[in-house]
């Protein structure tokens, strides 16, 4: 005589399906949250990079303006502090006839091992204070993740020679005009400004850089 086996109840079957469905939904939810977290982190990284690049570009533009302002003969005489005197000294040394390539006279040469390259270089250090080349960034708008962002710029300027029409009359309204015996020689320069947005990281700096370049004619 065969005994009847008990059949599984319907509530037990439904409970198993519910558990599997719940586990599946939890796995999908975990994957979704992880993907959204990575996307948000990527967006924050891109936003931070764009912001730093903008700060570096601002510093590069400021470097061009700073050079033009303090190499103007009208302003050079009052360039006695905040790093301005260094710029004037380097600029004058580069225009000093045959002595420009002597590193003892011109310590700001870009490369003293290349005497044919008539170029000077001025660099800044983010930790420097009291120099126009390093911005005094204080207050709101300059802090990121609790670290102060330092803006600064480096300059490189190269003597390229004299234009074809290379003298300017020293007398206002002089009919002698360009090329007269009383004229002052104008000089063509290449100017490169490298802006930096620096973030302190454990005693060093992580730098974001941007470069601006221009060619201009000046009268030393």
Image (cartoon, rainbow, N blue to C red):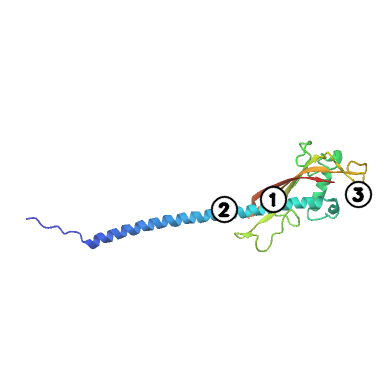
Q: Going 27% across and 61% down the picture, which residue do you hit? A: 15
Label 2 environment density (alpha carbons within 10 Å; few <14, some 14–19, many ≥20): few
Left or right, residue 50 beside residue 85: left
Cα distance in 3D space between marks 3 and 2: 56 Å
Image location of residue 153, percent across then percent down: 71, 51
Determine whether 71 is above or below 114 in the image. Answer: below
Given residues 129 and 64, the one toward you in this image is 64
Res 58 visible? yes
Single out the mark in the foreground, 1 or 3. Answer: 3
- 53 displayed left or right of 101: left
Q: Which residue is mark 1?
A: 195
The residue indicated by pointer 2 is 46
Residue position marked by numbered label 3 in the rendering: 173
Q: Is residue 181 left or right of residue 57?
A: right
For marks 1 and 2 on the same chain, the one whose residue lies earlier in the sequence: 2
The N terminus lies in quadrant: bottom left
Q: Is residue 125 visible?
A: no
């Amino acid at each position: 005589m065969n005994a009847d086996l008990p059949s599984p109840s319907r509530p037990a079957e439904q409970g198993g399906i519910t558990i599997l469905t719940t586990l599946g939904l939890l796995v999908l939810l975990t994957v979704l949250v992880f993907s959204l977290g990575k996307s948000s982190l990527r967006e924050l990284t891109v936003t931070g990079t764009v912001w730093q690049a903008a700060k570096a570009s601002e510093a590069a533009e400021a470097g061009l303006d700073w050079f033009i302002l303090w190499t103007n003969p009208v302003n050079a005489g009052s360039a006695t502090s905040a790093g301005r005197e260094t710029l004037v000294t380097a600029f004058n040394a580069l225009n000093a006839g045959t002595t420009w390539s002597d590193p003892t006279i011109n310590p700001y040469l870009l490369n003293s091992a290349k005497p044919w390259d008539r170029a000077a270089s001025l660099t800044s250090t983010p930790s420097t204070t009291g120099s126009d080349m390093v911005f005094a960034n204080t207050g709101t708008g300059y802090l990121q993740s609790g670290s102060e962002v330092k803006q600064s710029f480096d300059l490189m300027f190269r003597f390229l020679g004299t234009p074809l029409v290379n003298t300017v009359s020293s007398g206002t309204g002089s009919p002698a005009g360009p090329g007269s015996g009383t004229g002052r020689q104008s000089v063509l320069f290449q100017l490169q400004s490298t802006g930096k947005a620096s973030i302190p990281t454990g005693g060093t700096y992580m730098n974001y850089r941007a470069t601006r370049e221009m060619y201009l004619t000046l009268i030393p």
